[in-house]
Amino acid sequence: MAMSIGGSSGGMMCDINTTPLIDVMLVLLVTLIVSLPIMTHAVKLDMPQNKNQPPPDVRPEVIDLEVDFDGTVVWNGTVVQNVNQLEGYFREESGKDPQPEIHLRPDRRAKYDYVARVLAAAQRNRMKKIGFVNTSEFKD
């Protein structure tokens, strides 16, 4: 490797040495990064208070409710004659503690209107635990 110490005319070389400048900038950058406060993103949650009581082991009753393709509603194996009878069942069950779970099984060919009427009747009578069962047969 060759090194130039001066020019042929004997003049001085006036290049700035940038190595100390880069060192100082790196030290300042590291100091800035270390001195920045750590930002925390906290989410406030209102958790329920534990009163050292285990949850009750009482499982709710399960009501099997089927809706056939022609709109026939079957309540635990018994055919429901009309909407008033169905709402009477819902009123009776909504008052129980714990409230029973309704497992709704609509037929694959049942119109949406029939199922929507059953769900609306359950909602009007304050039924809260309603779930669809065996809906895998609806996937084609």
Image (cartoon, grey):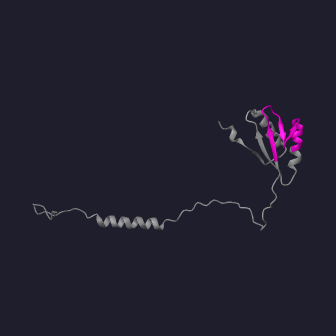
Q: Is residue 2 left or right of residue 96?
A: left
Q: Quadrant of residue 31?
A: bottom left
The residue at 38%/67% (across/down) is 27
The residue at 89%/39% (across/down) is 85
* In-front residue for pair 12/134: 134
Tell me the quarter of the image containing the C terminus. top right
Count numbered badges in the picture: 0
| Residue 128 belongs to the span the image colors magenta | no
Q: Is residue 108 above or below residue 3?
A: above
Tell me the quarter of the image containing the N terminus. bottom left
* In-front residue for pair 13/63: 63
Q: Quadrant of residue 23?
A: bottom left
| Residue 71 belongs to the span the image colors magenta | yes
Image location (x, y in percent) of residue 15:
22, 62
Image location (x, y in percent) of residue 68:
79, 35
Image location (x, y in percent) of residue 133:
74, 44
In the image, which residues are magenta?
Answer: 63-89
Q: Is residue 140 above or below residue 22?
A: above
Image location (x, y in percent) of residue 45:
68, 60
Q: Is residue 99 above or below residue 36?
A: above
Q: Is residue 77 left or right of residue 27?
A: right
The residue at 69%/39% (across/down) is 137
Q: Is residue 11 left or right of residue 64?
A: left
| Residue furthest front as drawn | 77
* In-front residue for pair 31/82: 82
